[in-house]
Image (cartoon, rainbow, N blue to C red):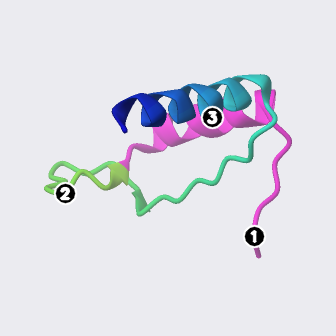
Amino acid sequence: MIQRAAQRLKFLTSRLMRGTAPIILMYHRVADLTVDPWGLAVHPARFEEQIDALTRDRRGRSSP
């Protein structure tokens, strides 16, 4: 079972690297928080880095 999961992960990773698999992102919060007990916030600078990387390598589409 673990071997099958590892093979699936390898397959999906290769699709992501080639740019053929869709990427769906969901963010709970983009904020600069002093305390984030559940680790759900993404710092605005990190968010910007992630979006820049995606727009460089992928064709984007956002939902309304």
Kindly report the distance in space between the C-alpha atoms of the residues bearing marks 1 and 2. Answer: 26 Å
Count of numbered labels shown in the rendering: 3
Q: Secondary structure at mark 1?
A: loop
Quadrant where the C terminus sits is: bottom right
Badge 2: few (under 14), some or many (20 or more) residues near its Cα, within 10 Å?
few
Magenta span? 42-64
Quadrant where the N terminus sits is: top left
Which residue is disc 1 drawn over?
63
* Mark 3 vs 1, N-terminal side: 3
Q: Position of residue 15 (x, y in %)?
A: 72, 30
In the image, 30 versus 63, the foreground residue is 63
- Splitting the image into 4 quarters, where does residue 17 fall? top right
Residue 49 magenta-drawn?
yes
Name the kind of residue labelled 1 in the image. Answer: Ser
- What residue appears at the point 39 percent right and 43 percent down from the top-left corner? 43
Which residue is disc 2 drawn over?
38
Which numbered disc covers residue 12?
3
